[in-house]
Image (spheres, rainbow, N blue to C red):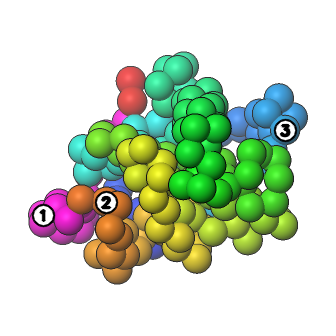
Amino acid sequence: MLADLMKLLPPPASPAYSNPDWARVENDHGIRLPADYKAYIERFGAGCIDDFLWVIDPFSSSSDLNIYKGDYFRKSYAVMKAEFPGDYPRPAYPAQGAFWPWGFTENGETLVWIVNDEPDSWSVALHSVDQGEEDLIACGCVEFLCKLLRSEIHSRILPEDFPSGGGSPYRFVPFK
């Protein structure tokens, strides 16, 4: 699936990481991450897709792009859930059915996994800016990106003009 994505979204000339310490990241944060996400990060690293979508990179030096950005989204959800419990049904991580952020948009929408069973079986969901709305897409993150760039996903959360009308190949700009 990563090869399909690389046809739609050419990666940087060199892989972002040759031997990242996934065990440290997973142990430090109490989570096992999906294999397709790890492959994406190892090849692409931190950067922006089509000037709009960012994938959280746990190894990034930027606090706006590393795994701590996901902490921000989870804490924001918890605050809103405390005030409006009927509008925010997801339990806190690590409970089954909780979410774990893996990306975000320039508008503030969040791309998350719904945590159930084994990481490679997690589905993607889109959360609105206030995280009160959710679109569930039954696939992993790399398949989701492929479908999104092929305009096969229609969401009430993402703007209609994303991805851009320019078509494939789309542009990936690495974070420096």
Q: In 3D space, how far apart are the residues under numbered discs 1 and 2 (Cα atoms)?
A: 17 Å
Q: Residue at x 84, y 38 (%)?
A: 30
Residue type marked 1: Gly
Q: Secondary structure at mark 2?
A: loop
Between 176 and 89, which is closer to the camera in this rendering?
A: 89
Quarter of the image holding residue 42? top right
Dot 1 or dot 2: first in sequence order is: 2
Mark 2 Cα-neighbour bin, 10 Å: few <14, some 14–19, many ≥20? many
Question: Is 150 placed above or below 171 here?
Answer: below
- Residue 11 location (% of width, % of height): 40, 51
Q: Residue at x 74, y 52 (%)?
A: 91
Q: In 3D space, how far apart are the residues under numbered discs 3 and 2 (Cα atoms)?
A: 30 Å
Q: Is residue 22 left or right of residue 105?
A: right
Residue that label 3 marks: 30
Q: In this orientation, does residue 71 appear?
A: yes
Residue type marked 2: Leu
Dot 1 or dot 3: first in sequence order is: 3
Magenta span has 6?
Answer: no
Dot 3 or dot 2: first in sequence order is: 3
Q: In 3D space, how far apart are the residues under numbered discs 1 and 3 (Cα atoms)?
A: 40 Å
Residue that label 2 marks: 158
Please provide the residue range marked out in magenta.
160-174
Q: Secondary structure at mark 3?
A: loop
Residue that label 1 marks: 166
